[in-house]
Amino acid sequence: MLVVTSTTGQGDVPANARQFWKSILRRKLPPTYLSNVHFTTFGLGDSSYPKFNWAARKLHKRISQLGADEFYPRGEADEQHDEGLDATFVPWMTDIRRHLLERYPLEGDLEPIPEATPIEPKWILALRNDCPIGQGNTAVAEDAAVTSSNGQFQGNPSPYQRTNSQCLNVVLQENRRLTPTTHWQDVRQLSFTSSSVASYGPGDILTIFPRNPPQDVETLLDLMGWTSVADQEVCFIRNKSFSRYSHYSPPSVTLESTSSPMSLRKILTISLDINAIPKRSFFAMIAHFTDDEMQKERLLEFVNPEYVDELYDYTTRPRRSILEVLQEFDSVKIPWQWAASVLPELRGRQFSIASGGQLKTDSHGHVCFELLVAIVRYKTVIKKIREGVCTRYLAALPEGSSLDVTLQKGSLGVSKEQTSRPLVMIGPGTGIAPIRSLVWERLQRGQQTQARPPEPSNGSISGKIDVGEMALFFGCRNKDADYFYQEEWYQLRKELPLQTFTAFSRDQKHKVYVQDVIREHSELVSRLLHELEGVVYVCGSSGKMPKAVRTALTEAFTRCGKMHQGDAEAYLQKMEKEGRYKQETW
Amino acid sequence: MAPAVTVDVSDSDFHAPSTNGSSNATAFVRTLLLSPPSLSSHPEKLDQILAAHDRNATDIQMLDRLSLALVTLPHSTYDLILILTDADNTRTESRKLLSSELLSRIVRSLKPGGQLSSQDKTLGAIEDSDERREAIFAGLILQDNKLVKPDYASTQSVPLRLGKKKAEGGAAATTSAAGTGAVSLNLNGKRKNGPPDTVQPAGVGFVDFSDDFDAPVEIEDDDDDDLIDEDTLLSDEDMSRPIVQPPECRPRTGKRRRACKDCTCGLAQRLEAEDAAKRQTADQNLAKLKAEDLAEVDFTVQGKVGSCGNCALGDAFRCDGCPYIGMPAFKNGEEVRLTEEVVQL
């Protein structure tokens, strides 16, 4: 058993592994439950997070505890490595294959499948008209004609319908640019309403499913020679070789519960990421679909782990898209029946919800969601400007549009009981979104549970709601350009025990960041977190910022909390363990 | 004690010959000699001991290099691992180096049924000694007064089917990692050791796992309260353990330095500036083309083409200094018309 897993949230096992994880955490399982199992694990992680690869480590430990035998040392990859995850994964995978062949030699005259053989997909697309009754299956759940031999499988279970997430239809009410047009970055406030019943809290997430621009889809159809089948109704059928494996479900190609027929064009528009950066495996696949020796050779070079640098320079560094690669390697003709297996899935993009408290309901009593979205546009060495797949879609989305989204529980774990806890909230840039939600939420809870004190009494700040003290640290480039919700903080400071501290990095000659401002207020930070045992939230971009913030907090404890540096670091770790250090970065 | 079947592991670190590991099994004793540092200055003693073993089946490693993890051992390879005595015929050095960490690594590289011993036969010989205790903690057992790695494959298994309701009654409901030893719960009566029998569809490496495990224990909804706390799984040591590195690095051919994602040393800025400069130069070249109002891109004209002649083929084939970098591929003789942003072909 080989387990490959990433880590999510606060050192948690990924959503689609939760059911499995729960099942092996059961206390009643004996320590010999997996004693005939040989296993190992490989973790995909990011060392800028404090709980680097915790999910893989926990899984490994638990599986070991249940008696399985580790037949090969486990491996871990780090996104922050020079060459990313491949740097560790490729040598690990290569060696484990060698090891497996030696330890479990193939019987008789079996040979390993040669590298050049394409592995066929389990499910392929076919024209609806060509499907014998009962064999085809659209991804739309209503098709009851398909059942497997054990009668279980009906239609397509959406991977998004897991615990903790809810599908909703929303209408875009507002799509407003917050930054001045003179500013280089376009940041929007998007407001959605829904007539469904939904509730959410700070840190919760809305997942938006982008659509590809019609002209890109047209370009691809034309390039691959798929135009003639583009608008005909299609469905998924099982690949003949796999008829016995009836319990595998087809690719989840559409989230929509529409009854309109599924066509190749639709699939390319809403379900397949034709503008994604191709991975190594993509090059391996498409090498099978060309007869041009020179192009094929070059494609296979990109697959070769020896040339991982070249692959990086060609794809990741300039952010080249699949569509652009196919335009260059124009001899490649992917069979349309395999489109859903060759092209990667168009995933929804997650956004931390920026609304909270009374902002969660509009004047009609409908549930409201506000998002703070920075539109992604930048230049690389490629002449054509780069755009984010989802933000490009959102930027052009007209008000009044209706779309299907999902609402998911976040990992900040803000509970009602904590309203009196002091908070240190650090949210530079768009990281302010979940924090804004938190503050509005706290305002509402405070208003609901306590009457406002009629006059100032000793120890409470005059006229303000009696909730835990809050210190907000916000950073951005220019006060006049991207100081989001400036007017709101002004109002909120009057009603809540809230202090705000800002760092405008480009408003003066030398750079000032949130971590610098945290240092300036070490005493306050140390009092709120150490003395009063408050909670700290770090939200925003991953990488440098959370690390720098962590260092600043350590320094604050050392300086004002009367601790040595080692103790300060240990104190931070203790806070993490207790759930008083929450990080939501992207 | 030495197993009858063998699989000879051919490893890049070692020079053991490889044999066909299937039906014609030969009794073949793979040995590892672990040499304390003092022996390196006494090659004659090393030669002496080596002479007593089959050259082709014996590997030798330095104990101190092993303890510093400068060398890794292959898994489940050796029938016999021998700790050599020091140059002064004592075991002072090896005793110092044989930590529990090192012992577990050594045990891992023993084959099931393999033996660990020392040249002077003192390893773990004294009852109740620390050494013997450490060896047992590392996973070895005493068999005929020798320290041996247990071979679970050949033990008799009592098939206890792990049925739905019997789970509570039969097994110890503890999470302790210590194995119960004697009774191994054979989860599938017909399963034998080694890779599962499969009927592979022709040409496809797809394996049917449905007969590997017993009937799955049903997940009842009221099981929520009886899960172990996952936060207790990792000890402080586990959490702070550094990133596990692969044993050997692959060869790097022409590796260029790339900046970290959150680069603080300035390399990222430099590379970004490089890319921007490349884009600028390329834009200038395109402007030149526009200025001369070409109906056709003529590759015979000097300066319009890079030195390799692959410009038309796209970025995948262009060399480093290509003036057409960042532009899509184009065909010879096609019109090159330029708009504000994007080159139209």
Image (tube, coloured by chain):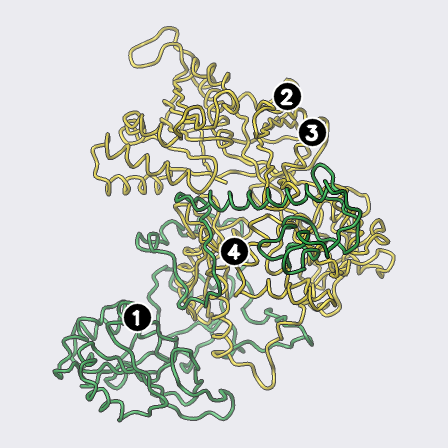
Chain colours: A yellow, B green
Marking on residue A365: 2
Closer to the chain start, of discs 2 and 3, is 3
Tags 4 and 1 both on a single chain: no
Q: CA distance from mark 2 to mark 1?
A: 65 Å
Q: CA distance from mark 1 to mark 3?
A: 61 Å
Return the x and y of residue B299 as percentages of the image width and height. 73, 56
Tags 2 and 1 both on a single chain: no
Residue count near mark 3 (Cα–Cα under 10 Å), binned few <14, some 14–19, many ≥20: some
In the picture, the quarter occupied by the N terminus of chain B is bottom left
The residue to which callout 1 is attached is: B104
Tags 4 and 2 both on a single chain: yes
Q: CA distance from mark 4 to mark 1?
A: 30 Å
| Tag 4: amino acid | Phe
Residue at mark 1: chain: B
Is B318 above or below relative to B264?
below
Choose mark 4 or mark 3, whichever is in front.
3
- Quadrant position of residue A562: top left
Q: Are marks 2 and 3 in contact (CB under 8 Å)?
A: no
The residue to which callout 4 is attached is: A20
Identify the secondary structure beneath mark 1: helix
Residue count near mark 1 (Cα–Cα under 10 Å), binned few <14, some 14–19, many ≥20: some
| Tag 2: amino acid | Gly
- Quadrant position of residue B263: top left
Which residue shows up at 42% across the image and 38% down it? A545
Residue at mark 3: chain: A
Q: CA distance from mark 4 to mark 2?
A: 39 Å
Marking on residue A162: none
Q: CA distance from mark 4 to mark 3?
A: 36 Å
Identify the secondary structure beneath mark 3: strand
The residue to which callout 3 is attached is: A171
